[in-house]
Amino acid sequence: MSQMSVPWKPTEPVKLGPFGTLIAAVGTALYRVFRPILIRVAFPIFLATLAGIAVFVFSVALLFGFVDDQLIVAATNGPELGLAGGELTLAELELGLTHAGVPLAVALKYAFWPLQYAIVRDIIIALGIFVFATITPAFAIWWERKSAGHIQSRPGPMRVGGWHGWAQPPADGLKLLQKEDTIPDDADGPLFRIAPYLVYIPVMAAFVALPFGSYWIFRNLDIGLLIILAMLGIEVVGVIVAGWASHSKWAVYGAMREACQMVSYEIPMGMALLLPVMCAGTLSLSGIGAMQDGGWHTWMVFRNPFTFGAAVVYFIASLASCKRAPFDLPEGESELVAGFLTEYSGFRWALFFFAEYTAMFVVAGLMVVMFLGGWNSPLPASWGTGLGDGVVGRALRGVIFGGPIWFIAKAYLLVFVQIWIRWTLPRIRIDQVLYSCVQVMLPVVMALLLANTFWELLFPADTVVAKVFNVIMALIGVAVVVSFLTAAARGFINRRQEVGCLAIDLTPGG
């Protein structure tokens, strides 16, 4: 018999070095200082942080608008104000700031001057997107642990950071950065190293065309929908490369499952999105979202019974696209160890999970734009016209009638539903996954597409029949939301009477 080969040899433990030791010491000291404060006021600090982020983003938009106004003034009224026109100089900016009544105009002109260049704005917005796409997975991981704990009658993370274990994800991230990065001896080194980035970068690139509001979009593309679907489709390439390069049968099996799953479910997912495209007549996501500003009854999901069915099909297919239960076969811990992740560790392992949770937000945001009113609130946007165009009026309209806050809240709600489903439904077999796609969802979505085509031809949106069905679907939606809220309120009120660990407070703040 031939001697068995060792798949990989352990290397020396990672040493932090002087700089790493200093960072660890400073972090430990800061934690000891601020822990007593955070235990008591962690949630108010969290709310204040959210409000601060919203104010900061709104302020950046106001700065961009102010610089644009100065450019217009310099171009149109330059001779009257003594301005040269075109590109703003420091003197012109100082004059504009002085006319606008901005204090410290002499000092602020140096901060405003770079904002007139598109490349500077792109860098600022890209950094904002990167920060948001980094915070979202950390928050979603904590949220998933807490949701899983409550569903299973246990508190979940409670220790690290104090209040409900809020610092557990950052602590895990620091731990993963220091873990040993192992590569199997028989693995394809370059492909093994590049695979996590092939998964993570396309998901990040999907934010380029994802609109958070009417003007809160990195690039307002006419084919924004195709860009996002293309980026989500590239992600599967990274998973296949990871499985193949690992030179492990568990990883290869996981990658094969991912390939079969994605190739299958991309078809009904894309076809389901054709229904709102057909109704709106455009592939522009900002245009589709703007069509749904007349109140909750104008959302695409309530337009007719077929768009409602398409929304359900899309959501199910999106679960398979993100490898979420009950379609988490590519990982399949009960049979494949960890699937395509089996040989990964440390930072590269973390990148896969960051990509997964970021993709969860992307597909949820796409559903919000296409079916659930986008960034519009349930109230008609026309009701907010009397608030004026000032800073206060624009802020109130963004909070009450439509803005990034509504888009993010809806997307996070759908992310929670994905988490909820994971800890409620069991994992199905790979043959059941393919059967439900090819022989169930694909014929259903084809029938919905055909039926919606005839519906739009026979009953346009301004006909009586279309309006009647729109009202019926909207009332059904209200009934579903009310039933969910009632069940949630009942569970919260009677939470201490339920059997399980949550009947008592295990730790302060529990």
Image (cartoon, grey):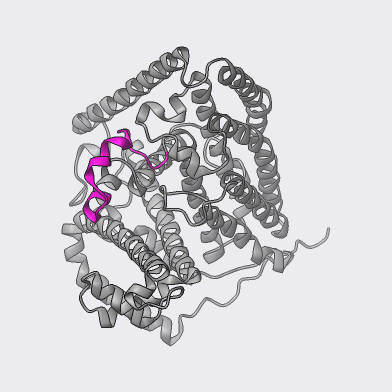
> In the rendered structure, does residue 391 fall within the stretch colored magenta?
yes
Residue at the extreme front: 80
Task: Point out residue 429 in the picture as x, y percentages from the top left corner.
Answer: 62, 32
Total labels drawn: 0
**Is any atom of residue 366 visible in this view?**
no
What residue is drawn where x is 42% and y is 40%? Answer: 374
**Is any atom of residue 121 visible in this view?**
yes
Residue at the extreme right: 1
Q: Please determine whether, in this image, residue 365 is positioned above or below residue 479.
A: below
Nearer to us in this view, 272 or 140: 272
In the displayed structure, does residue 84 sit left or right of residue 321?
A: left
Q: Which residues are magenta?
A: 374-394
In the displayed structure, does residue 448 sit left or right of residue 161?
A: right
Task: Point out residue 267 in the picture as x, y percentages from the top left corner.
Answer: 66, 35
What residue is drawn where x is 40% and y is 80%? Answer: 89
In the displayed structure, does residue 263 sit left or right of residue 175?
A: right
Residue at the extreme bottom: 18
> In the rendered structure, does residue 166 fall within the stretch colored magenta?
no
What residue is drawn where x is 35% and y is 42%? Answer: 147
Task: Point out residue 50 in the picture as x, y percentages from the top left corner.
Answer: 28, 55
Q: Please determine whether, in this image, residue 90 is positioned above or below residue 456.
A: below
Task: Point out residue 367 in the picture as x, y percentages from the top left corner.
Answer: 48, 38
Indicate the quadrant where residue 497 lies.
top left
Nearer to us in this view, 178 or 131: 131
Nearer to us in this view, 224 or 414: 224
Indicate the quadrant where residue 334 lies.
top right
Q: Quadrant of the N terminus?
A: bottom right
